[in-house]
Every structure is written in C-alpha cells, then in structure tokens.
Amino acid sequence: MYDFSDRIKNLNGTATREILKLTKRPEVISFAGGMPAAECLPIDEVREIARDLLSGENAVSLLQYGPTEGVAELNERLIAYLETLGLKAKPENIQVVSGGQQGIDLMLKAFVNKGDTVLVENPTYLAFLQIAKTYEANVVGVDADADGLVISDLEAKLKTYRPKLLYVVPTFSNPTGKTYTVENRKSILRLCEKYGAVILEDDPYGRLRYDGEEVPPLKAFDEHGSVVYLTSFSKTIAPSLRVAVAFGDKDVIRKISIGKQGADVQSPALCQMIVAEYLKRGCFDKTLERNIAVYRERKDAFLNALDKYMPSSVRYTRPDGGLFIWAELPQDIDAAAMLPEAVERNVAYIQGNEFYADGRGRNTMRLNFSSSSVQRIEKGVKILAELIKTKIGE
Ligand SMILES: Cc1ncc(COP(=O)(O)O)c(C=O)c1O
C-alpha cells in the first residue's frame, strides 16, 4: 500500500522477536536479553543527581537546546574517562552520541554509499547488521577464532572487497563474549591501514571485566587516525540515558557531528549532565564494582551449570567479562527451529544465525547471563540442556 524506500522496505522485525515477546511471561527464564540487571541500575544515585541538577542555577540549560558537540562539563569528564582507558583525546576528537547505536548509525552515514562493502566479524552485533542494511551496505563476514579475527581471512577480504570500514567488538563481544588478543588487535590495525579501511571499534562492555587481565582498546595502538572508538554508558550506568562517546580523528568526528545535527540535534542535556555528575561524584567506580560482583557470580553460576548439564558435544565460550556466552551445538542441531520448543519449556535464548552476515550459524545460540538470578540460571540451563539432549538423541 505504501511505497517505502528501497532501503527500508525489505526490513521486517525478525521472527525471533515475535517468539521472544512470549518471554515476557514471568515463568519464562530468559537468556535472550542483553540488558543490565534491573537491580544493577543506580536509581538512588541518579535520583539524587537529577534532583540536585534541576534545583541548581543551571536548570534552564538542562531543558533548553544546546550544542550538538555536547555539554562542556561532560566533554571534560569524557576526556578524563578516556584517559583511564589509555586513550588521549582532545575536545575536537570526541562527540557525545545518543548511545553506541547512534554512533554506529552516524559512522555508516558518514562513510557508506549504497553497495559499499563493510567487513564484520562472523558473528557480530545483530543491530549493526540491521543498520548497515538501511544504508544498503554490502556486509561481508570475516572468520574468527578464539584469538579474534582470522588474520589470513581478513587480509583476503580486504584485498577482494576493498571495504571502507571494518566493524568490530573486540572486548567481551556481543554475541560471543570473546576478547581479541593484543597481537590480533595489532595485526588488524596494521592490515586495515595497509588497505585503507577505517576501523569502528565498538566497546560497550570493556569495563565489565570479572576475571583476567585488562587488554588495551585497539584505539590505544592507533597512531594514524585509523580507528574510531565508541564507548557507551548503557551497560555501566543506564541504557535509557542514551549517552555514549565517539573518539576519533577530528575530520571524522566533524562529519559525525554534522550527521548528528540532522538526526537529533543534540543528546539530551539533562542526561549528559547526569553522566557528568555521576563521573564527577565518583559514583561510576563504586557502582561498577558493586555490579561487577553481581555479574561475576551469575557468569560463574552459568558456566558451572553448563559444565554440569550440557552434553559434551556442546561447546561454549568462557568469557572474562561482558554479558554473553556463546554456545555451539552439534552441526545438525538447529537452534533456530528449537527456539519455540525452548520457550514452551519456559526458557529462551537468541538463535545464533541472527548474528551472522551470511545466515550461517544455525547450530549456535547467544546466552545472556546478567539478567537472571543464580537460582533461575541453574534451572534454565538444566531445562535447555535436557531439550538439547533430546535433539542429540542422548
Ligand atoms: C555491541 C553493541 N554495540 C552497541 C550497542 C548499543 O548500545 P547503546 O546504544 O545502548 O549504547 C549494544 C547494545 O546491546 C551492543 O551490544
């Protein structure tokens, strides 16, 4: 009936979304989400900050239009925050964005013409694939292993496709929970520089580390402005504030700012100032430490339950942080087809093929460990394992 644009007309909500609506039932143990745990949201801290801000002398500016480039107080705090990650930024190198999601959108808006190739890890962040479709990009998956991207495959694809952009989530990836090694990061950077591809490093999970050693962001090794680093406060403060930051070469940041003017003029000043105050008052480290303890316990409980109940032919990642575990079932087990049955048994996950650029991975699934209590994790993993055993014929 409506004559939609080419870029949007073939995009529909996925079948998975329809099924996952059923997971709203309280009896369903959902490993499908990717949200911070409700009990980890810092309601008391944000209430106090918002009240102070709105009773202060600058209250008007919090409700008024402001600069697209972001509120100065936040920008100063962001520069200091990035420094704690080993990243040295000047004001012209950063742009506040309304969530990492907007950062992705604006990067694609800035770089991608219809038909341009963008490389991603196979599997990658599901929403990236969807946003890339709206820009009519040709998305090509690069093979990956436990260390990160498979460097020979990356080089082959850089040579063949001459992509404008490589998108990666190198630390506690969504969906696999995996972290690229330092060597892998350096090789990726070297190759992308050789073939002239810009790297979009998306890092919403890096601060959620429960075990192991810190690994510097890819951006920390970037000497030539080849990497745009995105980090969001959605998983470390609250997603609904919609505050994230893009850090890159000033010429790229300028284009992102121009793109943002057309998208939403500015990120809400009230939210920006809440984040600035949150950082200033030291709430960030305190609540992060508290939340890390909760997530670590849930991650360990999830892995223990997988070790206890899953058949030995099911393989899974053992992440040191983030929110996700990635499971691979035997090749002939279809996790997508099994999902309705799992939901019927009151347990949910996301089928892995949704995260592949080329629809592979039907025997894989993404499991979120942050949103369920330890008791529900144990119960849900047991149910899931029993269902998988019936499919394997054990
Ligand atoms: C890899 C990745 N990038 C970006 C986002 C978007 O997050 P936000 O827009 O809330 O910062 C998410 C959210 O789940 C994510 O997993």
Image (cartoon, rainbow, N blue to C red):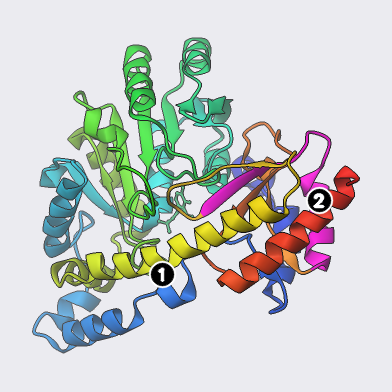
| Disc on the earlier residue, 2 or 1 | 1
Q: Is residue 22 magenta?
A: no
Which residue is more in the foreground, 185 or 391? 391
Which residue is more in the foreground, 156 or 176? 176
Q: On the image, numbered disc 2 is attached to which residue?
A: 388
Q: Is residue 375 left or right of residue 218?
A: right
Splitting the image into 4 quarters, where does residue 327 fall? top right
Farthest front residue?
A: 308
Count of marks overlaid on the render: 2
Q: Is residue 338 magenta?
A: yes
Give the residue displayed 19% in from the left and 60% down from the top.
Answer: 67
Q: On the image, numbered disc 1 is attached to which residue?
A: 240
Where does residue 256 sit, x and y in percent of width and height?
30, 43
Where does residue 6 sit, x and y in percent of width and height?
63, 40
Element class at badge 2: helix
Residue 238 can be seen in this image: no
How far is disc 2 from disc 1 in space, using C-alphas?
36 Å
Give the residue displayed 84% in from the left and 60% down from the top.
Answer: 341
Amino acid type, mark 2: Ile
Where does residue 348 sit, x and y in percent of width and height?
71, 62
**Few, some or many residues within 10 Å of mark 1 (<14, 14–19, 20+):** few
